[in-house]
Structure formats: C-alpha cells, structure tokens
C-alpha cells in the first residue's frame, strides 16, 4: 500500500469575498445598487449577506440589463446608510477577497468609514500570476475555466461567491507550485505585498493530498498541444487552388498574386498540397499564432517566430540573481507582477513563447528584456544552450518541410533555413509589415529614457527638438521633416553615441555584487538598451534614399512628435524583399483581381507592371451569395452640414432600431463620431428599451459581443474585426459616412504620383481601399449569415453626385441597389432580409 496521504490546509482559509454592483464606473458620480459579502471557512462558503441598495439617482438601461435588476426592485430597497452596520458586523475582522477589488473598495470606502481596514486579496492579480496561460481573466471566464459555477454573473452575491471559490482554487494551485518558485515570487513582489501570505505555505514533511482544481479547458494552458483544425472534405475549388500554389512553387523564380478567400487555406492543407515539394517552404499566416510545434511536427511542419518572442532562460536566471540581491526592489508593481507570472510560467511552458501568456505576455515592456534577442551571439557562453527555446524551434524548422511563421514576421525568417519558396496568406498587409520594420523615433520616449539615465543635457536637447517639431507642425498632423530639424537630429545622434559607452560602464560599476553579470543585465539595463535602440533608429532615419521620405508626425497618446522614414510604396519593397529571400513567392488574398484594376491600389499592395495575377474561381461571390445593394434615398438635399447629417443619421437609426429586432451594427468613421452619435440616440432608445453599446465609450471591440442581445444596438469603428469579436453576426450594417483617413502627407505624395499619370489620385488612394474594406465586410457576413442589408447614409453617394461618390458606387455594380425615402427603405430592407435575400441600402 502507498504512504498515508495527508491534507494540507490552504494558507488563508477564512475570509470574506465581496462584490458590489454600481450604476457606472465613477465612484464620484455613480452609486452602489447592490452589495454582497460571503464568508468562507477553510475555503468553503458558509454564510451570505447581500442587499439591493436604493441609489439616489437614475439607473441606466445598460446596467439594469447587465444585472437583471429592475427599477421597481431598487425603489423598494434600503439606502446604503441603513445597512452599513449589518455589513460591518457580518464581515467582522476577516480579510477580504475581491476580483479587481480596487473598484469595489473605491465605492465602499465612500460610504463605510475606515473601509476596508483589513488585508484585501485580489483574485485578478493572483490568477494572472498562477494561471499564466489563460485566455481571459474576467470573472466569468476564470470561473468557467476553473469549473466553478457562476449562475448569475453580474449579480453581486453570485460574483462574490465565485470570487471566494476562485481564491480557494488559487491557494490550492499555490500549494502545487514548488517552494523555490513561491519564494521567488515573494522576493519579486516585495515585503509589503498584501498577498505574500498566500505564498507562505506551512511545509508538511510527508506526502501531500492537494485539492487542486485545474482549468477545465486544458487546451488553453501553455505547452498543451492544440490540434490543428480538423481535416474536412476539401472543397474542389480549394483543392485546385492548393494544387496550383504547389505548381507555382515548383516553377520558375518570381512571384504571383493569387485571388482566393483565405479561410480554407490552413497550414495543414497547404502542407498536404506541398508534399511533393523538395525544399523547405515558408508559410506566413495569421493562423501561425495558434500552432504548436508538437502537433505540427507529425505533419512535417514546424512553427518559428522571431527571437524576441521566446523566453531566454539565461536572462530569466539573471533576473532571479538580481531579485536576490535586492536590485529590483524599486520596480513598479505591474513589472513585479509580470516577473512573478514569468516565474510560474517558466516552470510549465513547453514552447517558451511570450504570446502564450495572456495580458502580461508579448505586450509587456519587460518581455523584450527577457527574450532571446541576443541569439545567435549568446550561444558561445550560454549554459542552457540545449534547452534554449528559440534554438529548439530553429532546429525543428531546419528539419521541416513546411515552416509556418507569423505573417508579421515573414521578412524575418533567418537565412540559414534556406527556404526555397514562400506562401503569404493575406498580402494586403505586406505594406504595413514593411513599414513596421522601418526606423521610427518617438521623441517623448527618447526624452524620458535620457532623463531616467540622468542625461539631463541631452534630455533638454530633445525637449527643444520636440518644441521645434510641434511648432513646425502647427495644426497639421504630419509633414516632411524640415532640413534644420534633420540637422538637429544628426547632432543629437552623434552625442548619444558618444555617451552610450560611459553609461554602460557606470551601470556595471553601480551593480557591485551583481558585477559578475553582463554589462547591462536584463531589466536593470532596460533604459540603456532602449537608448541604444533609439540611437539605431536615428541612424536609420538619417540614412536617406530616394524612395522614402523622412516624416514628422504629431503621434497619439503621450507622444509629442514621432520621426520616421517611410517608403512611398512600402508593399513593393516588402514583395521584392520576399522574392530576394525565397525565390518563389505566392501571395494570396481575396482581393488580387480587384486590386489589379487600379494603379493606386496596385502600388499600395505591391503590384508592379508585368506582375502575374491568377484568379481562382470560387463559388462565394456577392452575386452568387445573393448580396446586392438596395439604395434608399431620402429627400433632404445633398448639402448637409456635419451636425445636420449627424442629426439625420441619429433620426434614421432611431427609426430603424424601433422597426426591427434584427442585430444592427453601425460602423462609424471615428471614435469622436461614435461619441457624438451615441449622445444623440442613447437617451431616446433607452427610453424605448433599446440599449446602445458604443465602442470607445462602453469598452473596446468587445462591445460587439452585445450584438446577440435582444433590444441592443452597437456602434463601432469602421474596420473593426466583426468575425473575430462576436459569435452573433449582424444582418444590418449602417454606415453613416465613408470613413476616409484624415488628410495626411503620405497619402498626398501617393495621390500626386497617381494623378501625374492622368488618373484620380484621391479615388485610387483614398476611396478604393474603403470599397475593398466594405466589400470584405459584405462577403464575410454574406458567407456567415447569408442575408444582409447595408445602409450607406453618406449624401456624397447619391446618384447624380460628381466625383468619388459615383466611382465608389460603380464598384458595387454586381450588387442590387435601391434609392428611396427613408421609411420605404427601412421597410424594403426588412422585407429583403426576411425573404432571405441580401442587399446594400443607400440613404442620405
Ligand atoms: S542560447 Fe542565448 S537566447 Fe538561448 S537561452 Fe541561452 S542566452 Fe538565452
């Protein structure tokens, strides 16, 4: 018989989990409408206290919908002041547990004097550390992953109980983490970290029985093998396309654009079609992110990303040395959390790819610091060479027939792979991929790095450069950099190059006990490496060539001036670079034939004179899917001001929303437009029991998830990925204005070049990309739901208008259309949808 198993108590067995529901996000302006506290003993819920709370102001429809609480219920409830005593008595002196409790504490501390007065554990923070591979840490998603029931999400009592159970699961998970890893986390997070007691486990001498709840969705854990999409019966056309791609790769050197929808071309299918191809072939695709080396290897495939996507084991160890020496105590809490997550993740990851870690993964600034960026130079001295994640991926790629790479890294494939061909799925992004590799300097970030390194004089020089740049820009968003600014940048670059060795020397000197580490160790040397990076960027910007321009932009967010070098036709450079690397290149996209008809689009997408375009006939087109514009016009005249048009749009949307229960998605040209439109229609629609969810106001692209809810209208930005963001797709699209980009220098330069050929620069550079995007939306939706209606409300599209409007509509000649008064248009559209047809509707 085995040894006797013994139960190990969780470190914090008794606690009170809590949650509040509120009228909104602002503790100043919003109010509590429900509170709940659930007492746990030994990680088990034993008693609950909850109460609805009568707020002293109106509650919006969206909150009532979200919580399922009615106005009548709230009116019959006590006010918060009258239940404070009960709350205090219930929770006693036990520690509190919340999911992102800062929010709840900010509300409760306004109404309960001295709240919280006890330690408050955060299950969001703890889950991010101990479950580093989960896709989402929202309460509902986390509960579902851990197999914890959450019957009524967004009701305080259910949320509080689920939070308490998650806290128990987290503690059990901690018990399964090795003592060494727990100690590292405590060291990283520091002595004043409230949750350190969760990691201070009383060690038991004997064998242990752990109550360990694993996430139910094992596939989402890092390192688990994800099956590739199941091989289904290949569509005949798709098969023909793949055969053709294989033939192309066998043929002569060069490149070919192929016109084909992308969703069928999975790596597995492409690999099958290339089975007879002798040399390794690179497949660059979005799908690559979901691949796993384990499952791919059996099919002769491997997955390879760039070194900065993999964890460097040597650097991870160096960080541990630094924490032991107390050198990282000064880090901000977000960075400490990231390092703690890495510590746990390192012990379970198979691939070492940062993108495995949700939220804190690839995007965190320190991921670069802990990555394999030093490869291959570091191989000479690395004690972990055999285990190096990047090296393992590289070796697997060298032995593979098909190497799948993330599309954005198709130009970074190392030469030693000797790939003899490349298939790029979705060539539309080639220009963006090329542009991302071009030198770019954010002046404000450079200034802040210099300041952080104590280079005050140089930081002041950058500040002067910023002022000069902003002055030159005036009210413009961007411009070609004036000569005197280029000269100032060159002088600054020289001085930074001079100061870099001194800074490196000073850092090494300051480390004392850590001086056995390399000159600029991970994390501590981050600013120095950033400065080296910016210096390299400056060098690239200053190196001129006649196919690019040096551009100064205002920048977004905290940026106060960004200087970059941009190619006028970047996709052409990207394509040439691909051909130089791989010889045979096949560029696939659903848009090749359309793009090839316009000089501006050809250049934007990398086509050159003489390029081959192969059109593969496929069954799903607008006409075959039954999609067609039905143009609806209202007699309001064409000369509308911005505010008149906004008002008209608002009126139209109100009528449309009242007339149908269909999912309606309004795709707007900008966030400011969304805010204005939401302000105009929300109150009216809410009073009619229709909730308006607006992107940028009520959340990011996830507002699309509300599309499936009855009585809901969603406003989002044109360009948002519908298919990837919602399960329920809209059958009605409303497009208030054609979403052109604001005037910008690069578009002007491109338009001038096209106009000099006697064509309309504006139509080919600004209008046609919108046509492409709209057609893509229509095709995707038609394929998915079969019957859709699209309202175009831009008056410039009305028949009889000159210029780009008629060119725009001419590109929808294969789609039925209709122009008619507003009410008739709505009725016609709904009939059209109900009859199973699809249409494009037009109104002004
Ligand atoms: S070989 Fe280089 S990248 Fe790989 S673990 Fe070692 S030091 Fe890091």
Image (cartoon, rainbow, N blue to C red):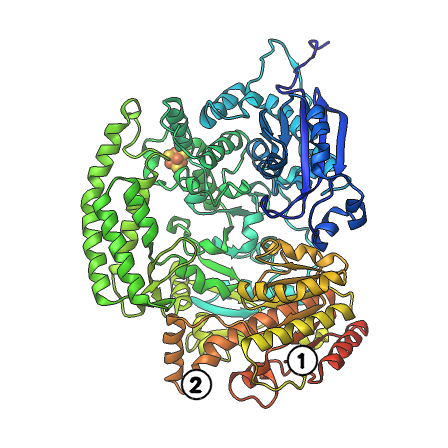
- In the picture shown, does residue 525 fall above or below 14? below
- Crowd band around label 1 with a 10 angstrom C-alpha radius: few (<14), some (14–19), many (20+): some
Farthest bottom residue in view:
800
- Quadrant where the image shows the C terminus: bottom right
Ligand 1 located in image quadrant: top left
Q: Residue at x 32, y 39 (%)?
A: 377
Residue 333: % across, % down? 46, 34
Asked whether, in this view, residue 686 is left or right of residue 333, the answer is: right
- Quadrant where the image shows the N terminus: top right
Q: Residue at x 20, y 38 (%)?
A: 502
Residue 283: % across, % down? 51, 56
Q: Which residue is mark 2?
A: 759
Does residue 247 appear in the picture of this structure?
no
- Crowd band around label 2 with a 10 angstrom C-alpha radius: few (<14), some (14–19), many (20+): some
Residue 421: % across, % down? 46, 59
Foreground: 621 or 125?
Answer: 125
Q: Residue at x 72, y 33 (%)?
A: 83
- In the picture shown, does residue 226 fall above or below 126? below
Q: Which residue is mark 1?
A: 815
Among the 4 quarters of the image, the one containing residue 442: bottom left
Secondary structure under the numbered disc 1 in the rendered image: loop
User: How many numbered tags mark residues here?
Assistant: 2
């Amino acid at each position: 018989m085995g040894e006797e198993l013994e139960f190990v108590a969780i470190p914090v067995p008794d606690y009170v989990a809590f949650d509040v529901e509120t009228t909104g996000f602002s503790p100043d302006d919003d109010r509590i409408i429900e509170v709940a506290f659930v007492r746990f003993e030994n990680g088990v819920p034993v008693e609950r206290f909850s109460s609805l709370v009568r707020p002293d102001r109106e509650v919006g429809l969206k909150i009532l919908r979200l919580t399922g609480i009615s106005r009548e219920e709230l009116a019959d409830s006590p006010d918060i002041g009258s239940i404070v005593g009960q709350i205090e008595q219930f929770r006693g002196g036990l520690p509190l547990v919340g999911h992102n409790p800062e929010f709840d504490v900010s509300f409760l501390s306004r109404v309960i004097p001295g709240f919280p007065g006890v330690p408050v554990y955060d299950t969001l923070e703890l889950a991010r550390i101990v479950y580093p591979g989960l896709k989402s840490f929202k309460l509902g998603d986390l509960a579902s992953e851990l197999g914890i029931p959450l019957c009524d999400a967004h009701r305080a009592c259910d949320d509080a109980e689920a939070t308490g159970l998650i806290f128990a699961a987290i503690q059990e998970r901690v018990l399964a983490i090795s003592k060494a890893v727990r100690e590292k986390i405590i060291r990283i997070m520091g002595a004043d970290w409230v949750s350190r007691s969760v990691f201070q486990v009383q060690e038991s001498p004997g064998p242990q029985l752990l109550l360990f709840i694993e996430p139910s969705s094992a596939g989402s854990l890092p390192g688990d093998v994800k099956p590739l999409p199941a091989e289904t019966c290949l569509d005949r056309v798709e098969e023909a396309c793949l055969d053709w791609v294989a033939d192309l790769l066998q043929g002569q050197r060069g490149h070919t654009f192929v016109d084909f929808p992308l969703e069928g071309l999975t790596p597995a299918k492409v690999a099958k079609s290339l089975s007879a191809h002798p040399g390794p072939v690179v497949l660059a695709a979005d799908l690559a992110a979901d691949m796993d080396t384990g499952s791919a290897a059996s099919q002769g495939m491997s997955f390879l990303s760039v070194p900065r996507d993999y964890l460097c084991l040597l650097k991870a160890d160096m960080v541990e040395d630094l924490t032991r020496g107390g050198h990282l105590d000064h880090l901000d809490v977000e960075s400490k959390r990231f390092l703690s997550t890495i510590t746990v993740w390192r012990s379970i990851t198979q691939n070492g790819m940062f993108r495995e870690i949700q939220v804190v993964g690839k995007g965190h600034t320190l991921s670069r610091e802990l990555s394999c960026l030093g490869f291959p130079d570091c191989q000479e001295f690395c004690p972990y060479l055999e285990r190096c994640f990047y090296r393992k991926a590289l070796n697997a790629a060298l032995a593979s027939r098909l190497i799948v790479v993330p599309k954005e890294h198709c130009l970074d494939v190392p030469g030693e792979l000797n790939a003899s061909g490349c298939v790029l799925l979705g060539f539309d992004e080639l220009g963006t991929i090329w542009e991302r590799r071009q030198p770019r300097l954010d002046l404000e970030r450079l200034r802040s790095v210099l300041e952080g390194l104590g280079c005050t004089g140089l930081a002041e020089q950058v500040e002067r450069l910023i002022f000069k740049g902003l002055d030159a820009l005036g009210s413009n968003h961007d411009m070609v950099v004036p000569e005197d600014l280029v000269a100032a940048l060159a002088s600054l670059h020289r001085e930074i190059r001079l100061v870099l060795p001194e800074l490196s020397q000073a850092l090494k000197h300051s480390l004392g006990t850590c001086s056995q580490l390399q000159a600029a160790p991970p994390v501590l040397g981050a600013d120095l490496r950033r400065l080296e990076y910016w210096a390299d960027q400056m060098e690239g910007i200053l190196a001129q060539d006649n196919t690019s321009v040096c551009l100064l932009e205002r920048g977004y967010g905290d940026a106060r001036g960004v200087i970059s070098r941009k190619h006028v036709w970047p996709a052409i450079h990207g394509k040439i670079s691909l051909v130089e690397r791989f010889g045979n290149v096949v560029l696939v996209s659903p848009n090749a034939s359309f793009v090839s008809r316009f000089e501006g689009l050809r250049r934007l997408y990398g086509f050159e004179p003489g390029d081959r375009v192969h059109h593969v006939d496929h069954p799903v087109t607008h006409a075959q899917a039954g999609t067609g514009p039905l143009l609806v016009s209202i007699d309001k005249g064409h000369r509308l001001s911005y505010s008149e048009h906004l008002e008209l749009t608002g009126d139209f949307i109100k009528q449309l929303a009242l007339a149908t229960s269909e999912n309606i998605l309004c795709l707007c040209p900008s966030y400011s437009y969304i805010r204005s439109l939401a302000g105009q229609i929300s109150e009216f629609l809410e009073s009619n029991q229709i909730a308006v969810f607006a992107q940028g106001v009520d959340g990011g692209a996830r507002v699309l998830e509300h599309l499936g809810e009855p009585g809901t209208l969603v406003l989002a930005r044109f360009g948002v990925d519908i298919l990837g963001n919602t399960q329920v797709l809209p059958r009605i699209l409303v497009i208030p204005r054609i979403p052109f980009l604001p005037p910008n220098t690069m578009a002007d330069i491109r338009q001038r070049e096209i106009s000099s050929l006697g064509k309309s620069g504006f139509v080919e550079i600004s209008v046609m990309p919108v046509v492409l995007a709209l057609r893509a939306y229509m095709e995707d939706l038609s394929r998915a739901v079969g019957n859709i209606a699209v309202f175009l409300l831009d008056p410039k599209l009305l028949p009889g208008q000159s210029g780009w409007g008629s060119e725009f509509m001419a590109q929808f000649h294969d789609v039925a259309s209709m122009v008619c008064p507003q009410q008739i248009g709505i009725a016609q559209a709904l009939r059209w949808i109900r009859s199973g047809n699809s249409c494009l509707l037009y109104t002004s």
